[in-house]
Amino acid sequence: MSYQQGYQFDYMADEGDMSDFVEDVEEENQGGDMGLDEYDMFEQLTKVSDTSSAQARKGKDIQGIPWDRLNITREKYRLTRLEQYKNYENIPLSGEAVDKECKQMQKGGNYYDFFHNTRLVKPTILHFQLRNLVWATSKHDVYLMSNFSVMHWSSLSGNLSEVLNFAGHVAPTEKHAGSLLEGFMQTQISTLAVKDNFLVAGGFQGELTCKSLDKQGVSFCTRTTHDDNAITNAVEIYDRLGGGMHFMASNNDCGIREYDMEKFQLLNHFRFPWPVNHTSISPDHRLVAVVGDHVDALLMDSQNGKTIAKVVGHLDYSFASAWHPDGRIFATGNQDKTSRVWDIRNLSLPVAVLKNNLGAARSIRFSSDGQFMVVAEPADFVHIYSTKADYEVRQEIDFFGEISGVSMSPDDESLYIGIWDRTYASLLQYNRRHTYGYLDSYF
């Protein structure tokens, strides 16, 4: 992945957010800079509140954007975004090549219903290519990054609380071999993973911080490498077949490191010829899908790190991967604006090539029951594909803002989307559609 941290903020700023748009509209209306009255109008236009499913059904914008008070319709602004948004590419014209050869799957799926948009929650992003910063541990509990803090949001109680603050000094309260007892100062968190009661945060300088959510303090701190190019790109926490939990960290120093979560010992360190952006382990724990700064993905033996197969088809670098619970199907997400679905029994051609609207596939999640695959773009769109329909039918969730992460609850009942925007930052919640959906007014 790109190491120019300063550049990435400029890149996201170039795309613009809704506050820039509203300000531009006001200046156009007033013919120049805003005076006091115009600033009052600007405050009114950008003053937004939560949106419930009942309000959305009555016509309120799910993000609270006051389209009726702007001189542009939502539909026209959507067309503007589609025309102007620039997909980031490491290999020039990779997305354009896909546009010519690949068609989008039909819309029409309706699997998850909008439930609530929470403005109290303010997701943020550190690096524009890394978007795994939102995790749901139940249908009501979500963990996410907000500036230097890991926050916990309960949709049941409506309570937002801070779990861990990296702005100051963070040090372990437990003693484990290899742990940095002095801890870290002002850690910039590039990636996050939360599963059950365990949290692992990865930093921009190779830091790893582990915490048990049912205990006070931090369990373990380590710096994986002192390499200048040390960004922790992704972390995956998973159950071991024999019991216990492990996690795997993917790093820009071209390494994958596996740790146990009981004593926090380094179990394996596998090296590759290019920076590793994301890994995911198969349900039977035999294989690891490895993607990074190369057009090809790899299938790796989880025990010895040997490459079992190359996965060929993408045209740019990949930043996402995920396994279907059947253990035969996996998916990769790429900056060529596609997700590709693969079957390990025949890797010569993908099962499906799924094209995005704006840009790269930054996050991929399969539902626990295997019925759906969720793909998040860098901004504005999340797609839900039906695996039963061979990925040929999708639900498109459409909004405005950069996506910090997407997560399904373990029971597949809730889908959460983090939106990063200076004015309209929020957490979107969608609930799985059931025949008794009318009961949502009681919850």
Image (cartoon, helix red, strand yellow):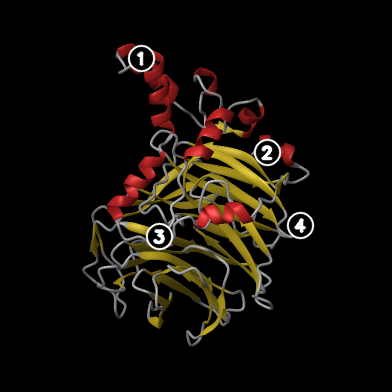
Amino acid marked by disc 2: Asp
Say which quarter of the image contains residue 308.
bottom right
Q: Nearer the viewer, residue 175 or 326?
A: 326
Mark 4 or mark 2: whose residue is earlier in sequence: 4
Q: Say which element carries label 3.
A: strand
Front of the two marks 1 and 4: 1
Q: Say which element carries label 4.
A: loop
- Label 1 to label 2, Cα distance in Å? 46 Å
How crowded pointer 3 is (Cα within 10 Å; few <14, some 14-19, many 20+) is rated as many
Q: Is residue 29 above or below residue 372?
A: above
Q: Are marks 1 and 4 in contact (CB under 8 Å)?
A: no
- Label 3 to label 2, Cα distance in Å? 33 Å
Amino acid marked by disc 3: Thr
Please name the residue that numbered disc 2 is placed on: 440
Q: Is residue 80 above or below residue 191?
A: above
Front of the two marks 3 and 2: 3
Q: Is residue 181 above or below residue 395?
A: below
- Label 1 to label 4, Cα distance in Å? 52 Å
Quadrant location of the C terminus? top right
Residue 46 — which label?
none
Amino acid marked by disc 1: Gly
Q: Are marks 1 and 2 in contact (CB under 8 Å)?
A: no
Please name the residue that numbered disc 4 is placed on: 389
How crowded pointer 1 is (Cα within 10 Å; few <14, some 14-19, many 20+) is rated as few
Please name the residue that numbered disc 3 is placed on: 191
- Label 4 to label 3, Cα distance in Å? 32 Å
Front of the two marks 4 and 3: 4
